[in-house]
Amino acid sequence: MKFSRENIVRWLKVPAFLLCLGPACVLTWKTFHDLLGANPVDVITRSTGKWTLTFLLITLGVTPVRRIIGFPWLIRFRRMLGLYAFFYGTLHFMTYVWLDQFFMVEEMIADVVARPFITVGFMSFVLLIPLAVTSTTKMIKRLGGKWWQRLHRTLVFISMVVVLHFLCLVKAFVQSSLTFCWLLPLPLC
């Protein structure tokens, strides 16, 4: 077997994939072993939300990090990381729709109107959908490189909206919200 950079990157994707899946596995394990505390829906909602934001920032950070440390092959992980951000965002959204609101559309509409952070969160999830849908190689070719790149550059704006959603939720500048605010501008360098 030839150990080229291509083969090494391909093999590194497997543990990276499993590592990214880790938070969902831990949350699932805690759910089935009744370790989520008195308000499990809140724990699931907050966990999936924080992992969504974390993966968005990691995805945005791939390009500057690869330039700084000189590892161009890191770009090969960006799509997977972005799709994991969407995966955790979908879990976060479905937790709200299913476990928190029980698919009651009238309640959700009232909640979106009454609580601005839900509106901001819903908007950011809707904005992530086109990015996830167009992340395949076929869609890149169909859209053309320039249009695809323009579309995917909106991830910076979407990440800002997600940070705003997070800040509105915590209502105080706790350590984690300050960390997310500090990390967001790094990919813009």
Image (tube, grey):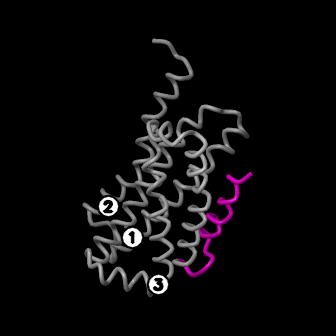
Q: Secondary structure at mark 3?
A: loop
Kindly check if marks 2 and 1 are in contact, taking CB atoms under 8 A apart as contact.
yes
Q: Name the quadrant containing residue 101.
A: bottom left
Q: In the depicted view, which residue is nearer to us: 36 or 94?
A: 94
Disc 1 residue crowd, few under 14, some 14–19, many 20+, Cα 10 Å: some
| Residue at left offset 32%, top offset 83% | 107
Mark 3 surroundings: few (<14), some (14-19) or many (≥20) residues within 10 A: few
Mark identifier at residue 43: 1
Label 3 to label 2: alpha-carbon separation: 29 Å
Residue 17 highlighted magenta (yes or no):
no
How many angstroms separate mark 3 from mark 1 (CA)? Answer: 19 Å
Give the labeled residue for mark 3: 115
Residue 30's label in the rendered image is 2
What is the three-letter code of the residue carrying label 3? Arg
Q: Is residue 163 left or right of residue 1?
A: right
Depth order, front residue of 165/39: 165
Which element type, helix, strand or loop, lies under badge 1? helix
Chain part drawn in magenta: 170-189
Q: Amino acid at mark 2?
A: Lys
Tell me where residue 173 sits by quadrant.
Answer: bottom right
Question: From the viewer's perspective, is residue 73 above or below residue 108?
Answer: above
